[in-house]
Image: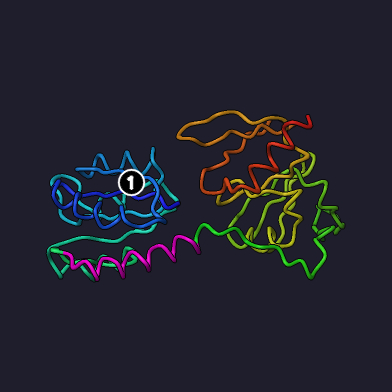
Amino acid sequence: MIRVLIVDDEPPARRKVRRGLEHDADIGEIREAGSGEEAIAALRDFAPDLVFLDVQMPGIDGFGVLDAAPAPRDFHVVFLTAHEHHALRAFEAEALDYLLKPVDPERFDRALDRAKEQVRLRTAPAMPDRTRPFLRRLLVQTHTMEIFLPVERIDWAEAAGNYVDLHAAGNVYTVRTTLDQLVRQLDPDQFVRVNRSQLVNLDSVKELQPWFHGERLIVLKDGRELTWTRRFRTARAASSLRQARSSR
């Protein structure tokens, strides 16, 4: 279900957007914000998938809200405004769409359909290629030589641009790949992506703890703490992590 935040300083405008959403079976929880300050707090606490964002508001405007949003931006934006001249800046801000008030219902539905598809693409977990065996070892560079590192020795990994840092028994090995590419090569029953930039070996997990805003804190056996964000809490990942915790 898609979580939606409606941001507009005019209550009638928020109600109109809400009416356009409530008939859609794909829409889950809907929250509203009447100012830029409320919107920034909601982005942090509610973590929406989709935001309908008014451009012109007293105090912090829509662009100011995006500037203040927690990084990385894990939501899509549809701008709402009565003025066409904000369109270029809206698309520079990577908005999915730009709706002029008063919003035509058919135009709203088209924008919503497009937004839902983009949310699905963003949140869909990468499916492993079952026609290929999972990766068993990686060639890594040490100070003096190259070695083949068995993947089961990796405790966790972290993205570093076009590289990934592999943390294994207190050592760090850097390989030239992306986290997306690495995830697709690893057994999803053994390795779980827990946030945008990190994955974890389930055998290295000591425990899970409740954290802020519905997230979880993953404590590894070596004491390292990682954050498991809501966006990456798929049903499969949740099951795998619960099994890892219960087996301790």
Q: Is residue 229 left or right of residue 154?
A: left
Q: Relative to residue 225, is residue 121 depicted above or below?
A: below
Classed neighbour count for the residue bearing mark 1: other residues with Cα under 10 Å, few (<14), some (14–19), many (≥20): some
Residue at the image point whose x is 72% and y is 59% from the top: 175
Where on the picture, by quarter, is residue 35?
top left
Provide residue 112's location: percent of width, then percent of height.
Answer: 33, 64
Q: In the rendered view, how is the structure colored?
A: rainbow
Q: Residue at x 60, y 55 (%)?
A: 160
Q: Position of residue 88 (x, y in %)?
A: 24, 71
**Which region shows up in magenta?**
103-121
Residue 217 picture quarter: top right
Q: Left or right of 133: which side holds 106?
A: left
The residue pinned by badge 1 equals: 30
The number of discs equals 1
> Where residue 159 appears, x then y in whole percent?
61, 54
Q: Is the magenta region chiefly helix, strand or loop?
A: helix
- What secondary structure is marked by label 1? strand
Q: Tell which of 219 and 3 is nearer to you.
A: 3
What residue is rendered at 70% in x and 34% in y?
A: 220
